[in-house]
Amino acid sequence: MSVSRSYALLFLLAIAVATGWLQGRAAFRWGPPLEMQRLAKELSHAKWELPGWRLSEQQQFAPPILDLLQATGYLKQRYEDVNSQETVAIAMFVGPTGPMVTHMPEVCYNANAYIQCEPPAKWEFLDSNGLRNELCATTFRTDDLHQNYIRVYYAWSTDGLRWRAPASPRLAFAGQPYLLRLQAAVSLSNQHRKAEGDAAYRFLQQALKHKYLFSSEANESANAAGGDKLIAGQHKSARDAILGAVTFQKGSND
């Protein structure tokens, strides 16, 4: 066998091994990544403590939805504005990238007797340092005489520190083994469909601006100002701060 042919065979073998490894990694053939397992565990005990909002309800997703998304962890909660009594439904999932970016709200809501009445639009939410978080929002109405409206905001993150809503999430997150997916939904009246004024927009704007969602800086700021404690626990790195502003209620069902 010639040297050139030997090199060619080794090259093809290397490609085959690399391809198999990438496919196995994407399919979690050797088990879910440890970081994803940790996030899944923490989400099951998490709730937000955001000034002006209170947790009004803990909810669960039906098994078929979790199976569809292949979610390894999630939270589903409803928060109430203590002043206006408006409510916002918040959901977060962690799971493999493919299902997280494939099953879009536009598909899911249209399959459940909703009609999309506004095209998706991107909204920017700046944090206190001027860094941009980008979420997509779209509006649906029920396919009945009542025509109830609902707006849904959604985005993905690789680390929980910055949220993105790319036009093609499958391409944008290619090679990422898992993602966090954030979704916020709010009911609207036909007269109050301006995005900047709805309760979900206000919730996200406040949370992302002050990093109450995913940064230990929120607790430091609150302590420095003499305010309420927003974080339970100390976090030593940005990676550990992914769920930093969430209070973990271990052993609690409230």
Image: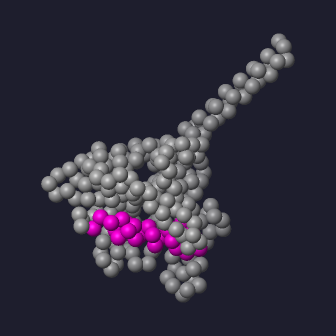
Task: Locate residue 146, reporting x and y percent.
Answer: 16, 57
- In front: 248, or 145? 145
Q: Quadrant of the C terminus?
A: bottom left
**Relative height, residue 27 to residue 59 (above, below):** above
Task: Locate residue 201, reporting x and y percent.
Answer: 39, 67
Residue at figure coordinates x 23%, y 63% from the top left: 190
**Relative height, residue 97 to residue 223 (above, below):** above
> On the picture, is 5 further left or further right than 79?
right
Q: Which residues are magenta?
A: 192-218
- In front: 169, or 12? 169
Task: Locate residue 60, reporting x and y percent.
Answer: 36, 57
Task: Locate residue 44, reporting x and y percent.
Answer: 46, 59
Q: Is residue 59 visible?
A: no
Magenta-span inclusion, residue 131: no
Q: Quadrant of residue 161?
A: bottom right
Magenta-span inclusion, residue 193: yes
Residue at figure coordinates x 27%, y 68% from the top left: 192
Q: Is residue 138 visible?
A: yes
Residue at the limit of the structure toward the top, as seen here: 1
> On the picture, is 230 further left or further right than 234?
left
Residue at figure coordinates x 41%, y 45% from the top left: 103
Q: Tell me how the rendering is colored.
A: one colour
**Relative height, residue 85 to residue 110 (above, below):** below
**Relative height, residue 144 to residue 131 (above, below):** above
How many numbered marks appear? 0
- In front: 76, or 82? 82
Residue at the limit of the structure toward the left, as seen here: 145
Q: Quadrant of residue 182?
A: bottom left
Residue at figure coordinates x 66%, y 68% from the top left: 236
> On the picture, is 106 further left or further right than 131?
left
